[in-house]
Image (cartoon, helix red, strand yellow):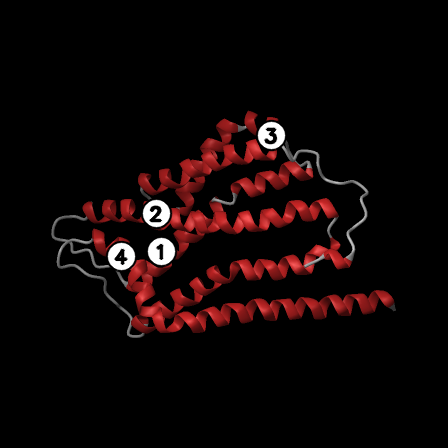
Amino acid sequence: MSDANNLISHLIELRSRILKALLSVLIVFLCLAAFAQDLYQILAMPLLDALPENSSMIATDVASPFFAPFKLTLVLSFFIAIPYVLYQVWGFVAPGLYRNEKRLVAPLLLSSTLLFYAGMAFAYFVVFPIAFAFFTSVAPEGVTVSTDISSYLNFVLKLFFAFGVSFEIPIAIILMCWTGVTDAKSLRAKRPYVVVGAFVVGMLLTPPDIISQTLLAIPMWLLFEVGVIVGGFYAGNKPSDETSSETSDNT
């Protein structure tokens, strides 16, 4: 009977933390909703700066001028609320972790958030200007480049996600080394395959141009090297029979 009560209490806590996470996204969205048009203007700047003179973006759907900015605002609200969402995840799983697992997982949650933001920033400030300048420069003569605002939003969100996730490579490597799935020496031996794999992933996740693929593949390779170096310090550090921390140690 106690097991059933524990299960129910865990489910109640899970529901509470999910509602808190969703509420945080909603609060951020309500704060940003009034600036939805301005936020889309900022997002569109890399493309607008690359468009030929007298060119502009277009809306091929009647409702897209309204929905596209609010879709961006909703996604941005989630990105901004990620630290609090992860805090709720941490609060739920922390009681079941070993004490030294907490010392590892907490910094990883923070660093994974920062790396995701760094990947998005790299895409916006480095990849977008170069890629859009390339796309607009290769348009055939007589073709006016006018991108639909909804298509542009879907395109950049895909790249944001691709670069954000790719920048999590060091975290994944550290976890694999820590859990004993692999080690730094084995990963170094697989470096040639990793480099090839990085360019394959860059080809699959980015537009079909060598510039975007290279701008994703090279950071992935460099982040792999960082992960291997840091992961070497965590190899074999997973506890075997350490008792879990007291509930009072959680957040």
Q: In the structure shown, which secondary structural element does the residue marked by tag 3 occupy?
A: helix
Estimate the spatial distance between the alpha carbons at disc 3 and disc 2, rounded to whole Å.
Answer: 32 Å
Residue matched to label 4: 45
Mark 1 in CB contact with mark 2 (< 8 angstroms): yes
Separation of residues labelled 2 and 4 (CA atoms) = 19 Å
Q: Position of residue 22 (x, y in %)?
A: 55, 69
Placement of the C terminus among the 4 image quadrants: bottom right
Query: What secondary structure is found at the residue carrying circle 1?
Result: helix
- Using the image, tell me which numbered label, if any, was put on residue 155: 1
The residue tagged 2 is: 207
Residue that label 3 marks: 184
**Labels 3 and 2 touching (C-beta < 8 A):** no
Left or right side of 220 for 52: left
Q: Is residue 14 above or below residue 161?
A: below
The residue sitting at 46% across, 31% down in the picture is 195
Badge 2 marks a residue whose secondary structure is loop
Q: What distance separates the C-alpha of mark 1 from that of mark 4?
A: 14 Å
